[in-house]
Amino acid sequence: MGIIIPTAEEADKFTKSKKIGILATQATVDSEAYVNEIAKINPEIKVFQQTCPLFVPIIESGEKGEKLDLVIKKYLNELFIKSEKIDAVILGCTHYAVIENEIKKYLPEKVKIVSQGGIIAEKLKNYFKKHPEIEKNLKKRKERIYLTTKDSEKIKKLAKDFFGEEIDIKLVKI
């Protein structure tokens, strides 16, 4: 299903000004994936991208506080210099949802923050409704299985930060 296309399909619901900011990794910005997909759906929307190279390392280190706040302020300042009329900001990396509340603190009051988790969940739910043959073949045991190539305390801490609870991890050898 992906993340970018389902988010782009909803983009015009986020903005009245037709100006959206994207906080993303360097690779995502360089690909212009959001710019291109949003333009396909609504060419009137202008997309302003901001690379955030320090977000993932900070998130993965579990660091919060002053350092994270300074980095968030820096990236948001750079984004809003590009266009002060942005009224929605898409978190263009799944890691960024972990610091969504911290980012919200520094956004102007009328700017919406868009995290893809809810969008993707809703799109997947709708996809299964349209394709009951797929859903029919799914096992519904209400079981979550988390696979990783490394079992360490860092992975367990990150998992707890990402999911809000301790999880059982199954080690996979590649």
Image (cartoon, helix red, strand yellow):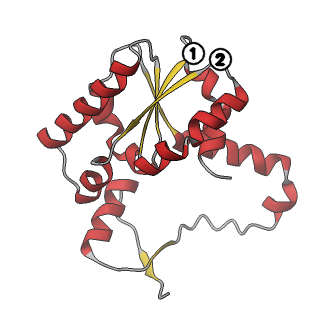
- Point out residue 72 in the picture as x, y percentages from the top left corner: 26, 35
Q: Which residue is drawn at 45% across and 17% down?
A: 86
- Point out residue 85 in the picture as x, y percentages from the top left corner: 44, 12
Q: Where is residue 170, by image quadrant?
A: bottom left
- Neighbor class of circle 1 (other Cα within 10 Å; few <14, some 14-19, many 20+) is some
Q: Disc number at residue 44?
A: 2
Q: Where is residue 156, by image quadrant?
A: bottom left
Hey, which residue is sitting farthest bottom in the picture? 173
Q: Which of 79 and 9 is in front in this view?
A: 79
Q: Is 158 situated left or right of 73 in this image? A: right
- Disc 1 element: loop
Q: Is 167 situated left or right of 68 in this image? A: right
* Observer able to see residue 21: yes
Q: Is 40 situated left or right of 47 in this image? A: right
The kind of residue on which mark 2 rests is Glu
Residue at image mark 1: 18
- Point out residue 157 in the picture as x, y percentages from the top left corner: 27, 64
Q: Nearer the viewer, mark 2 or mark 1?
A: 2
- Neighbor class of circle 2 (other Cα within 10 Å; few <14, some 14-19, many 20+) is few
The kind of residue on which mark 1 rests is Lys
Query: Along the polypeptide, which appears first: circle 2 or circle 1?
Result: 1
Distance from the alpha carbon under mark 2 to that under mark 1 = 7 Å
Q: Is 157 situated left or right of 46 in this image? A: left
- Disc 2 element: loop
* Observer able to see residue 164: no
Check if mark 2's residue and mark 1's residue have beta carbons within 8 Å.
Answer: yes
